């Protein structure tokens, strides 16, 4: 990644949760922390280590946040669905759609 700060785009889920999206290689990647917050998944690191395809996980350095530049983990679309399918919350289907 470039040394420049990266400003992801975001979408609002139910007007209460913003999910940051970063385009990598022309494909949307989703901020794992944001997705886990929407689906009330308490431990994104454990999920990342045990359930996700590692080739679909990327740490983006220098992402601009309210707290300054941060390192955030983004997942590709197949991994996004792996996270969604792990959730039993009613919001999971709505989020998937």
Image: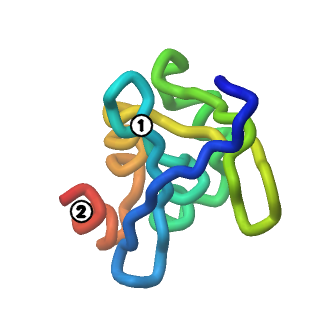
Left or right, 20 with reference to 71:
left
Question: Looking at the picture, does residue 77 appear above or below residue 17?
Answer: above
Residue at 25% from the left image edge and 56% from the top image edge: 96
Q: Circle 2: is it few (<14), some (14-19), or many (20+) Cα within 10 Å? A: few
Q: Residue 93: which disc?
A: 2
Q: Position of residue 57 (x, y in %)?
A: 54, 27
Farthest bottom residue? 15
**Residue 36: quarter of image:** bottom right
> Which label sits on residue 23?
1
Residue 84, x across and y down, in percent: 36, 51
Secondary structure beneath dot 1 equals strand
- Provide the secondary structure element on which disc 2 rests: helix
Please report the residue visible at 74 percent of the width from the left and 41 percent of the height from the top. 62
Q: Identify the residue at image location x=44%, y=61%.
A: 10
Q: How far from the left and from the top, in percent, is residue 63? A: 68, 46
Q: Are marks 1 and 2 in contact (CB under 8 Å)?
A: no
């Amino acid at each position: 990644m470039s040394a420049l700060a990266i400003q992801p785009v975001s979408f609002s889920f139910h007007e209460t949760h913003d999910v940051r999206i970063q385009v990598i290689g022309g494909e949307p990647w989703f901020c794992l922390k944001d997705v886990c917050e929407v689906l009330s998944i308490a431990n994104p690191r454990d999920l990342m280590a045990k359930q996700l395809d590692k080739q679909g996980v990327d740490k983006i350095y220098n992402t601009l946040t309210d707290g300054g530049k941060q390192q955030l983990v983004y997942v590709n679309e197949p991994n996004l669905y792996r996270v969604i399918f792990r959730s039993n919350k009613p919001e999971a289907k709505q989020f998937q759609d």
